[in-house]
Image (cartoon, grey):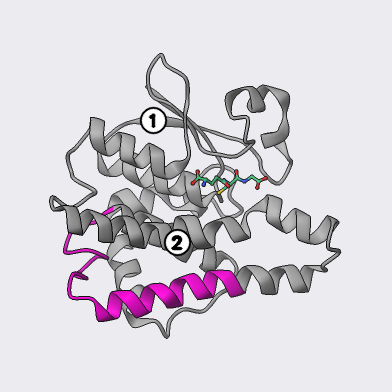
C-alpha cells in the first residue's frame, strides 16, 4: 500500500492525492500537522529534511518528495490515464501552466513564509492575509489570461481530459477559496474548476474532505 505523509490543507499534498485517485492507486495518508509544527519534528525531518509535505512511500526505496517530481514519477510508472499530453509541445504547455501555480505562486503562501512575515518582519494578521490573498489572486488571474487566449484550452486546462496543470490549478483555486479570494470574475478558471470538481477523483481529494479539516465530512 502506498503511504503518504501530507496535511489536509496542503496544496502540494492535494495535487498528489488527485493524481493517485485518477490513476486508481489506493493509498493511506498520515497527517503531519503543519499548524502544530510537526514538520519540524526530528522523526519527520529524517524522512523529509526540507520539513515539508508531501513525502510518498511507494515501494521499498526512500520516500519521494516534491509534488511535481512525484506527479512525473506516477506518470512514468502508471501512464494510464495520461496526465501529460502525447506531444512534446503539449507537454511543455502543461508543465508551464503547472509551474505558474506550483513553482511561482504556491511557495509564496506556505506556512514558513507566513511565519517569517509574522516573526521576523512583524507583519500583523491583516497584512499577512492581504499578502496571501494577493498572491493567490495574481496566480489565478495570470492563469485566466493564458487559458482564455490559448487554443489548446478545452474543458480542462489542456484539451478535454485533466492534466497535471489542472491538479496545480485546483490546488491553488481551493486554497484561494479557503482564504476567501473571489475569482468568480475569472470565467475560464471558474469553468475549469467546476469541471474538475465534477470528477470524483478531484472531489475525494479536496482539502476539506480530509481528516483534521475543520469541516471534514
Ligand atoms: N514545492 C514543494 C512544496 C512543499 C511545501 O512547501 N509544502 C507545504 C505544504 S503545501 C509545507 O509542508 N509547508 C511547511 C512549512 O512551510 O513549514 C512541493 O510541491 O512538494
Per the image, the residue denoted by label 2 is: 101
Local secondary structure at mark 1: strand
Instruction: Report the front residue among 135 and 202.
Output: 135
- Give coordinates of residue 47: x percent, y percent: 58, 24
Q: Is residue 98 above or below residue 67?
A: below
Q: Which residue is at the front of the view, 211 or 32?
A: 32
Instruction: Report whether residue 189 is seen.
Output: yes
> Horizontal and vertical percent for residue 164?
31, 52
Which numbered disc flags the more N-terminal residue, 2 or 1? 1
Could you tell me which secondary element the residue under label 2 belongs to? helix
Give the magenta part as a residue range.
Answer: 134-163
In percent of width and height, residue 59 lies at 37, 18
Q: Is residue 74 left or right of residue 180?
A: left
For residue 144: magenta? yes
The residue depicted at 51 percent of the width and 75 percent of the height is 138
Q: Determine the residue positioned at 48% across, 70% down.
A: 139
Residue 192 — which label?
Answer: none
Identify the residue under disc 1: 27
Amino acid at each position: 500500500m502506498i503511504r503518504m505523509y501530507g496535511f489536509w490543507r496542503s496544496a502540494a499534498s492535494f495535487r498528489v492525492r488527485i493524481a493517485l485517485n485518477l490513476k486508481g492507486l489506493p493509498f493511506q495518508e498520515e497527517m503531519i500537522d503543519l499548524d502544530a509544527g510537526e514538520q519540524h519534528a526530528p522523526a519527520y525531518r529524517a524522512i523529509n529534511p526540507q520539513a515539508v509535505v508531501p513525502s510518498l512511500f511507494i515501494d521499498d526505496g526512500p520516500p519521494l518528495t516534491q509534488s511535481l517530481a512525484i506527479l512525473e514519477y506516477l506518470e512514468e510508472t502508471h501512464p494510464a490515464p495520461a496526465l501529460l499530453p502525447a506531444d512534446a509541445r503539449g507537454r511543455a504547455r502543461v508543465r508551464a501552466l503547472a509551474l505558474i501555480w506550483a513553482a511561482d505562486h504556491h511557495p509564496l503562501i506556505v506556512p514558513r513564509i507566513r511565519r517569517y512575515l509574522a516573526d521576523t518582519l512583524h507583519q500583523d494578521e491583516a497584512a499577512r492575509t492581504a499578502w496571501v490573498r494577493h498572491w493567490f489572486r495574481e496566480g489565478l488571474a495570470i492563469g485566466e489570461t493564458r487559458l482564455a487566449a490559448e487554443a489548446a484550452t478545452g474543458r480542462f486546462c489542456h484539451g478535454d481530459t485533466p492534466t497535471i496543470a489542472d491538479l496545480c490549478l485546483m490546488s491553488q483555486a481551493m486554497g484561494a477559496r479557503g482564504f476567501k479570494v473571489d475569482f468568480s470574475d475569472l470565467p475560464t478558471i471558474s469553468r475549469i474548476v467546476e469541471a474538475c470538481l465534477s470528477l470524483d477523483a478531484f472531489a475525494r481529494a479536496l482539502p476539506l474532505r480530509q481528516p483534521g479539516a475543520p469541516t471534514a465530512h
